[in-house]
Amino acid sequence: MFDVQFITHFTASISYSDSARIALEGGCRWVQLRMKDASSEELKATAVQVQELCRQYGATFIIDDHVELVKQIGADGVHLGKLDMPIKEARERLGKDFIIGGTANTFEDIRQHAADGADYIGCGPFRFTTTKQKLSPILGLDGYHSILTQMREEGITIPVVAIGGITREDIPSLKASGLNGIALSGGILKAENPVREMETIIRLTQ
Ligand SMILES: Cc1ncc(COP(=O)(O)OP(=O)(O)O)c(N)n1
Ligand SMILES: Cc1ncsc1CCOP(=O)(O)O
Ligand SMILES: [Mg+2]
């Protein structure tokens, strides 16, 4: 199984909930609402909308950054970065029935997140991307190979998805590298036909 996680982001032409709908119509079954700089009211209203869409499609629904909102509306989980609530604290607040994802740029990040109780890792950036402002050092395939080798050597088996500027052309090499999946945003939303693009990506990851 090679997972595909769609991450929403702001575009002038596609709303957050429409972008989630596009991903779901294209066959994606794991959606993350990443909505920066929104008011808490706007974020909650959008989260409830996207949660309902995910329910209709039987998809997993994750919210970026906001642990309390995840608990409040009963989303499936949260994704936490280095500047967000520590994973250990989020696990204490959410308990074992919620998915907690953690951001990693190095093997040491992954080792710490696994020890703190994360369920999966978003590891990147694979290449440069404008979707996220403050990027960590670019990893590339060599970076993933090095990290996955260290994980094998230490017997760390937490699922790792690649993220950062990923497009359909990258899927064969990312699949072959031993990663567990990908997370992407712009590669779908910037496509001429985003639903078709997601369908192609899902087919390539089977
Ligand atoms: C799957 C996945 N991986 C990494 C990230 C990045 O999250 P974070 O470090 O919290 O950065 P922001 O998304 O908050 O800018 C992610 N959201 N999802
Ligand atoms: C949230 C995030 N974290 C590292 S890169 C990234 C952006 C992913 O979006 P895209 O697939 O458009 O590069
Ligand atoms: Mg974050």
Image (cartoon, helix red, strand yellow):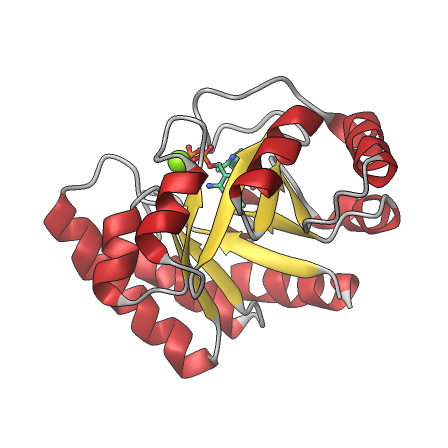
Q: Quadrant of residue 153?
A: top right
Horizontal relation, residue 134 to residue 33: left or right: right
Horizontal relation, residue 97 to residue 107: left or right: left
Residue 110 image point, x, y percent: 64, 34
The residue drawn where x is 47% and y is 80% is 58
Residue 153 in the image: above or below residue 203: above
- Furthest toward the left, the residue is 41
The C terminus - image quarter: bottom right
The residue drawn where x is 60% and y is 28% is 109
The residue drawn where x is 82% and y is 31% is 150
Query: In the image shown, does 108 or 49 lie closer to the viewer?
Result: 108
Residue 181 image point, x, y percent: 69, 53
Please give the count of numbered marks on the rendered protein: 0
Residue 185 in the image: above or below residue 22: above
The N terminus - image quarter: bottom right
Q: Quadrant of residue 51?
A: bottom left
Residue 105 image point, x, y percent: 62, 26
Query: In the image shown, does 84 or 198 lie closer to the viewer?
Result: 84
Residue 13 image point, x, y percent: 34, 49
Horizontal relation, residue 144 to residue 176: left or right: left
Horizontal relation, residue 149 to residue 160: left or right: right
Residue 16 visible in image: yes
Residue 123 in the image: above or below residue 182: above
Residue 106 visible in image: no
